[in-house]
Amino acid sequence: MTPLRLTLGYVPGGTPAKWARIWAERHPEVPLQLCAIAAADAPDAVRAGTVDVALLRLPADTSGLAVIPLYEETTVVVVPTDHLLTAADEIAAADLDGEPRLLPLDDVVAWAGAPGTPVEHRPETTKDAIELVAAGIGVLIVPQSLARLYHRKDLTYRPITDAPTCPVALAFPEGPQSALVEEFVGIVRGRKPGSSRGQAQPAPKRTARGEDAREAGRPRRGGQGRPQAAPGRTWTTLTDYASESRRRLAGDGKPGQPSVPRSAVSRAYSSNSAVAALPLTGSVSSARPRPPVQSMAHPDISARPWTAER
């Protein structure tokens, strides 16, 4: 059985260290092999399966590849430390007019009509061209990462403000991918651990506060009827009934005590002072019955005993 592993190719100046570190933290059981490849060979290495994914420079022949642009590098010019161009922190393309310019065979800066006068001899690699810059043969235009990669104490570089940038991208074969390739692409895209495309979001957790809010929105059983007397107690008069209604409406000053809407009966009785004085027959009532009051809304209420419902 072939052991699990992932191979990442990268061109000179590419910086896979960040993603390699994240991969090692998330998948320590699956080694990530780094493979340095020439810029011109990177697309073919991915198509041939020599590497699973690759950091390459654009433009390039990416037929049959899926490409994710990552970032764009600043274009700089490499010159000797005592060159006249070092007097400024950055230069324009016009400042290179008339300067002998080295053009290596592996040149990666896509700049048609680049400034300067091309040197007839073309070195094989950018590294060889750096040696010629140190010898005073000419200047060299490269991405900033290559200027840093081949840094020498006798050389320096300056950004070219109006030069085209140098794009860097991640490439892998088109079509369905292995789980390892998809995971690495997710890391490059900034996907967090445990997340994936199309993964269902977890259901929100139910909390006590949410339950209380739902309970508060539900209607209580019994509707808006009159308040019930406590067990073992009956109201002696309608005054007790009205007091109980008002206490329920006000919440009785107790935290969390629900307010009971006043029913039509409680409003009628509590607003009639004469009716509020009427005694009621009950298990604990000893008041003498009073004659009926003519202004009652219900004149026959005194003709029959009334006891609070249990």
Image (cartoon, rainbow, N blue to C red):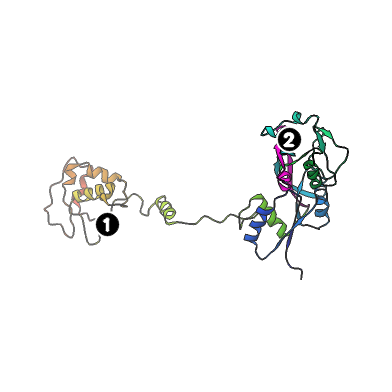
Alpha carbon separation for disc pair 2 and 1:
106 Å
Instruction: Answer left or right for 274 relative to 6.
Output: left
Residue 282 appearing in the image: yes
Residue 172 drawn in magenta: yes
Residue that numbered label 2 is attached to:
83
Q: Residue furthest left?
A: 288
Tell me the quarter of the picture where residue 153 sits.
Answer: top right
Query: From the viewer's perspective, is residue 75 above or below residue 192?
Result: above
Give the quadrant of residue 222.
bottom left
Could you tell me residue 10's position as x and y percent?
75, 52
Residue under label 1, please give it. Answer: 309
Q: Looking at the picture, how far across and down is residue 50, in whole percent?
A: 81, 58
Front residue of 163 and 305: 163
The segment highlighted magenta reads 145-174
Mark 2 against mark 1, which lies toward the viewer?
2
Q: Amino acid at mark 2?
A: His
Point out residue 294 in the picture as x, y percentages from the top left corner: 17, 41
Q: Amino acid at mark 1?
A: Glu
Query: In the drawing, what numbered circle is on residue 241?
Result: none
> Which corner quadrant holds the C terminus?
bottom left
On the rendered structure, is 115 left or right of 299?
right
Viewport quadrant of the N terminus:
bottom right
Q: Earlier in the sequence, mark 2 or mark 1?
A: 2
